[in-house]
Amino acid sequence: MADDFTKIEQQVDKYRNEVIDLEKLMTSIPALGPENGGDGEMKKAIALKAYLKKAGFPDPQEFNAPDDRVTDKVRPNLVYLIEGQDKSKTVWVMAHTDIVPPGDLAKWEGDPYTMRIVGDRLYGRGVEDNQHGLVAGVFAAKAFLDTKTKPKFNIGLLFVADEEVGSNFGIGYVLEKHNDIFKKTDLILVPDSGDPSGTPIEIAEKSICWLKVETTGRQCHASRPDQGINAFAAASKLAAKVHALYNIFDYKDTLFEPATSTFEPTKKEANVPNVNTIPGDDVFYIDCRVLPKYKLDEVEAMIRKWADEIEGSENVKIRISPLQRAEAAPPTAPDAPVVEA
């Protein structure tokens, strides 16, 4: 097995140009969910399938999740399997094909969808999150194919949609509808974090909660604020309180980076188009990443308490609804086989 490892390692070292080419191809195809103004991941998945077919991979299993919001009416989830000597266990590498929007294009030094090489770094939307994981999995598996080395266990590559906005059409759908592809003995790697050295291994995640905050007041002309209720001003009072959550839920766990829970007001929707109107409606969003020590219910209850107080003092209505909500899964043991491997 030591000889096989050396052979695979040496083969992977030959792939530098191919790694760059696949990253460049994947970066050139925007794969945004409809929540982010995109049309899903199908074009990217089609390009990936064509690339892998040419590279000698077997045909994938496709577990497409129905979604009427996108042109193709489905969100693609691809599974590639390479048989091992022992077929009772599969070593999975899971990566996601969707990306987040590039944000303010003026902040980029080039087109976010045209990959640039600067020294030994690649720049472009998605090259790290999560194409580094996708590409790493592809070429680790390709090394076995190219050297005609049969792995000890099956190798599974799972490329899923929709990770950035909830996973309901990605791994969530696969687990719900096609859970039989996994076995309890399988080892699963999700290369979706790390640093340039490639040495950190993440064995736990924080809980996540995205909240939409809708405030309703009464619109009026800005010269007569006495005739209206400023929804923006009221919502701002709640937004300003969000950072107080850092002091309330202040436990630190160095297993995580950062070691604390995080609570940030993020997106703000436009309210009125002109300066001289007091808005009757306001919408903003909060991103919470919470250490497993705390339950999301505790965080949401505190935000709701503040919202109730502001409703009373400002005579507004505040509706808070979750866009994405997931309690942290139990951590993987540091001495688990998948970690020690």
Image (cartoon, grey):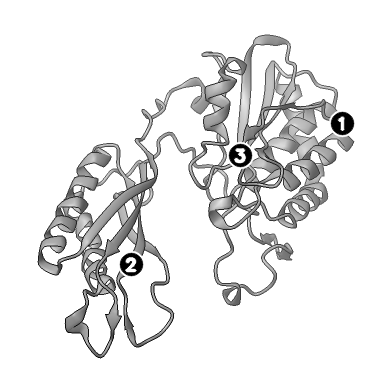
Residue 253, by quadrant, is: top left
Closer to the eye: label 3 or 1 = 3
Q: Earlier in the sequence, mark 1 or mark 2?
A: 1
The amino acid beneath tag 3 is: Asp
- The residue under the point 75% across, 37% down is 139
Q: Secondary structure at mark 1?
A: loop
Disc 3, SS = loop
- Quadrant containing the N terminus in the rendered view: top right
Mark 1 crowd level (few <14, some 14–19, many ≥20, 10 Å Cα):
few
Question: In the image, is 185 to the left or to the right of 333?
Answer: right
Q: Tags 2 and 3 in contact by the CB under 8 Å rule?
A: no
In the image, 302: left or right of 108? left
Mark 2 — residue? 282
Q: Which sits in the foreground, 273 or 210?
A: 273
From the viewer's perspective, tell me whether residue 326 is left or right of residue 107.
left
Q: Provide the secondary structure element on which disc 2 rests.
A: strand
Lower sequence index among marks 3 and 1: 1
Identified at 75% across, 47% down, the residue is 43
Which amino acid does the dot numbered 1 rest on? Gly
Pointer 3 and pointer 1: residues touching (CB < 8 Å)? no
Residue 307 locus on image (x, y percent): 19, 57
Q: Residue 304 at what x, y percent from top left? A: 19, 51
Along the horizontal axis of the image, is 76 left or right of 319?
right
Residue 194 in sight here: yes
Q: CA distance from mark 2 to mark 3?
A: 29 Å
Q: Which mark is residue 67?
A: 3
| Amino acid residing under circle 2 | Asp
Residue identified by numbered label 1: 56
